[in-house]
Image (tube, grey):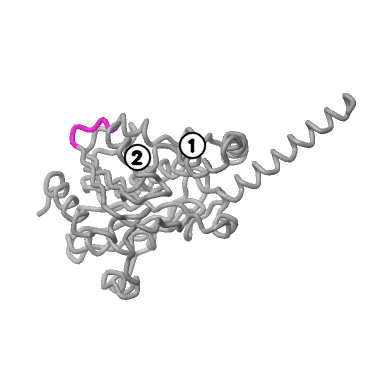
Amino acid sequence: MGKKGVISAIGATAGLIGAIDYTIFNAVMSRNSKLVDKAGGFLNKKPEDAVELPPEEEDERIIWFGKQVFDDYTLVNKRGQTLKGYLLKADKPSDVYVFCSHGYRCNGKREFRFITKYYHDKGFNVFLVDHQASGQSEGSYIGFGYYEYQDCLEWLDFLLKEFGGDIQIILHGVSMGSATVMMMSGSENLPENVKFTVADCGYTSAWHEFEHNISFLGKAEYIVLYGADVFNKLISGYHFKDADAKAAVERAKLPMLFVHGTKDDFVPTRMGKELYEACGSEYKDLLLVEGAAHAESYQTNSEAYNRKLDEFIEKFIKTA
C-alpha cells in the first residue's frame, strides 16, 4: 500500500470511529434516542440475586399517588428552556418543602411515586421537577447532572420567592438526580434554607459512570469514551468530567444521607461508599440496602429507609 493508500486508510478509520462515537453520544444523551432501551435494555438490567419486587399496581402507595392532585409550575432556565415542576401541597400549611430530583430517562412523578406518601404523611410539601430533556420539560440532550444542578438551584430561588424566604428545604435525588443534588450541595450558591440532602444511588461522576458501563468494550473503551466526550462538549457544552459529584460532596457542609443498594450494577455500590467517605459534611450517614438493585432501595426496604429519614428529619427539621 502506498503513502496515499495509508493516509486514506487512516482517514477512513478515523471517520468510522468518529461516526461510532457520535452514534453512541446521541444514543445515550439525546431524549429522542431509543437505542439505549433497545440495546439489551441495560437500563433495567437486574442481577438474578437482587430482591424481586411485587407488582406496582398492588402497592397502596402507588394507588394513593395516582389519586393526588399536583399544582403545575414552569421555569425558564438560563438556557431558555421551559422546565416543569409539580407541587403536592401538605394537607395543613407547612414551611417544609421536599425538592425531588429524578434519574436518567425518568421524570419527577415516576421516580418518586413510592416515597411521596411518606413525605406527605409527615405533613410536608413535595415538589417534583422534570429535568431538561425529560418528562414535560424542554431540551434535546440530557445533562447528567451538570446542567440539572444549575437548573435546580434556579428552582430553589423560585421556591423561596414563591413560598417565602424562611421555608425549610430537603433535597432528595435518585441516580442522576442524586448526582444533581450532590452537586447542588457543594455549590456556593446553595441557600441556607436547605437543611439536609438525601443522595440515593448516585455516581461519582458522569465520566466514571460511563466508564463503568462500557468496560465490556475492553481496549476500545477509552476510544469510545473520549470520542463521545468530544461530541458532548461540542453539542452540549460540557465535558463528562465536569459532572463531578465526588468533588462537590468534598465541599459540602450540610448533613447528607447516602443510600445505595448492594445489588446495584448500573451505578455500582462502591460509588456510594466512595461518595460517603469523600463527603466533607460534619454529619453524614450511609444506608446500604441489602439486595436492592439500582434505584430500588426504597421499594426494597422502605422501613429501613424511613427510619433513616426519620432520624434526619428529627435532627434537622423544625416542625410546629
Asked whether residue 234 is in view, the answer is no
Say the numbered circle drawn on residue 118. Answer: none
Give amino acid for label 1. Answer: Trp
Q: Quadrant of the rendered structure where residue 278 is?
A: top left
Count of labels shown? 2
What predominant SS class does the magenta segment belong to?
Answer: loop
Most distant residue in the left direction: 320
Find residue 251 and report its image quarter. top left
Range of the magenta residues? 279-283
Left/right placement of residue 142 relative to residue 189 reads right
Dot 2: element: helix
Counting other residues with Cα less than 10 Å from the Cα at mark 1, is it few (<14), some (14-19), or many (20 or more)? some
Q: Residue at x 39, y 58 (%)?
A: 48
Mark pair 2, 1: CA separation = 15 Å
Q: Residue at x 42, y 34 (%)?
A: 244
In the picture of the structure, the residue carrying the numbered disc 1 is: 207
Q: Which mark is residue 270?
A: 2
Residue 172 x %, y %: 30, 50
Amino acid tagged 2: Arg
For the point 23% across and 36% down, which residue is it?
A: 254
Q: Residue at x 37, y 50 (%)?
A: 264
**Foreground disc of the pair 2, 1:** 2
Q: Position of residue 242 (x, y in %)?
A: 47, 33
Q: Position of residue 209 (x, y in %)?
A: 46, 41
Viewer-closest of 247 and 304? 304
